[in-house]
Amino acid sequence: MPELSREEQLATAFVDLADTLVQDFDVIGFLHTLADHCVELLDVAAAGVLLATPTGQLVDAAASDERTRTLELASIEWDEGPCRDCFRFQKPVPDVQLATTTAEMRWPRFAPRAVKFGFTSVVAAPLRLHDQVIGALNLFRDQPGPLNAAQLRLAQALADTATIGVLQQRAVSEQMTVTAQLQAALDSRVIIEQAKGYLANRRNTDVEEAFTVMRGYARSHQTRLTEIARQVLQGTADASLLERRDR
Amino acid sequence: MILPVMADYLRTLNSHAGPGLAPLPLAACADMLGLDGLGLLLAPGGEKAELVQSFGERTVALEDLQQVQGQGPSLDAAHHGALILLPDVADTTAFATDRWLGLPGAIEALGVRAVFAFPLRIGVIALGALTGHRVRPGPMSTDQLTDAFRLAGTISQIAIATAAQAQLPSAPLLDEPGLHFAEVHQATGMLADQLDTDCDHALIRLRGYAFSQNRPLLDVARDVLARRLRLDDNGDNTS
């Protein structure tokens, strides 16, 4: 594929993120697309997305790599970090340099762990529509210096587009409120996790690689990630996915 | 975050003796959710969903009707994990008319006008359904839906815990919030393949092992994922 210009990349990202009015829209798969686009388009090393359950519990929805995923999980477990602050105060968390006393005082466990993972700074943008915040987007850099203002605006624009996408998705139910949609997304996330573990054992890999394989398959077959995950667990997935590999 | 209506129930749960689920405070739950009736269906191990607890004079009839017809919101929720919200069963333009031929009219004849079926599930693990109804049409409010999801989540945890307790009678019913964590679900999938079983049994196994070793579920899940721990078919083995 020829190298796309930045404008073309941008246009593709927004089309991808707006293209949610399709049958079988898959929120979790979609949020992974958001994380990937952020890493491609912005001067960041990694991106993570957290969603809030209707009861306000944050869960890790998507991440550009498993390192970030681990960090997001730790953040939830410790109840500290940029995404949690962003969600709690319902506003963006501007650039925080991680290897500083300020960062360490604010996030005593999160900041050192992020530094250990090679990250230098982080920002968080809310997934927000009007007064409703459904989650947050974390962006990590591994280079010196903050994310510039233009990129930050672009990040928020991507987050906004994604939020509209999540909230607009079609559903089978008649009275499909945002609450119900989010619940469905969170439930499908559990199925994906179960399938990751299953496939990791089957293929003798770690869960990250299992997920990459599953996503790649879903993408190339234009099938929902959740559907592939379900097929994996039911043993009805394509043999190429389920082929057992021994150590 | 426990619903106040469930607090007392959860406190008494661990002292509950006897088979099955201790009676839920369904009347109070229905009241909280603005419903006229509420039924709990369980489908252990993928078996046919059955009404095990109910509140409201029309609940048993509503579930019987669906059992007889072999179709309906409760069964779709219990077996397929579908969330079914029917604010007006008399609305013939609604999808219910095509989905369950002949059922909406029969439901209406029972004096029921709105049906809301919430699946009880943990990923692919289908545990049952919580089905509520109203004698008047109208949607549930956002707050009521939110509470209903919380209630369904709590009952799902109790249901899987009850299953674990059936195999390990001394296990406490509710012990940890570990089910929020992705690693527990990943480890469930990993175990399902290792033990050549389904996720239901894998999760029960994982939970039972954590309890018998007096360790947090999340820790055990991490050991399974790191291949530091293997649970074989017969006993609990560390490799």
Image (cartoon, coloured by chain):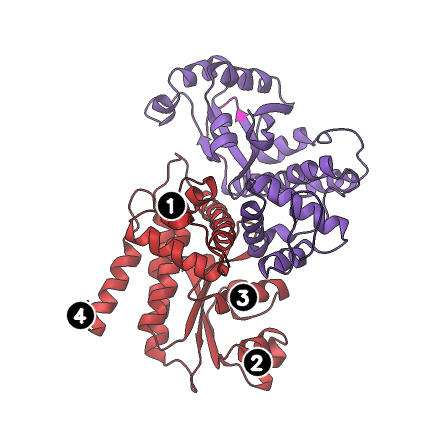
Chain colours: A red, B purple
Q: CA distance from mark 1 to mark 2?
A: 48 Å
Q: CA distance from mark 2 to mark 3?
A: 19 Å
Give the numbered dot on residue A2: 4
Residue A135 % position (x, y):
47, 59
Q: CA distance from mark 4 to mark 1?
A: 32 Å
Judge depth for marks 4 and 2 and give the one in front: 4
Give the numbered dot on residue A103: 2
Precedes in sequence: disc 4 or disc 3: 4
- For label 4, the crowd category at 10 Å Cα-Cα, with few meaning under 14, some 14 to 19 and many 20 or more, is few
- Pointer 1 residue: A239
**Disc 2 secondary structure class:** helix
**Disc 3 secondary structure class:** helix
Disc 4 + disc 3, Cβ < 8 Å:
no
Q: CA distance from mark 4 to mark 2?
A: 41 Å
Number of numbered discs: 4
Name the image quarter holding residue A62: bottom left
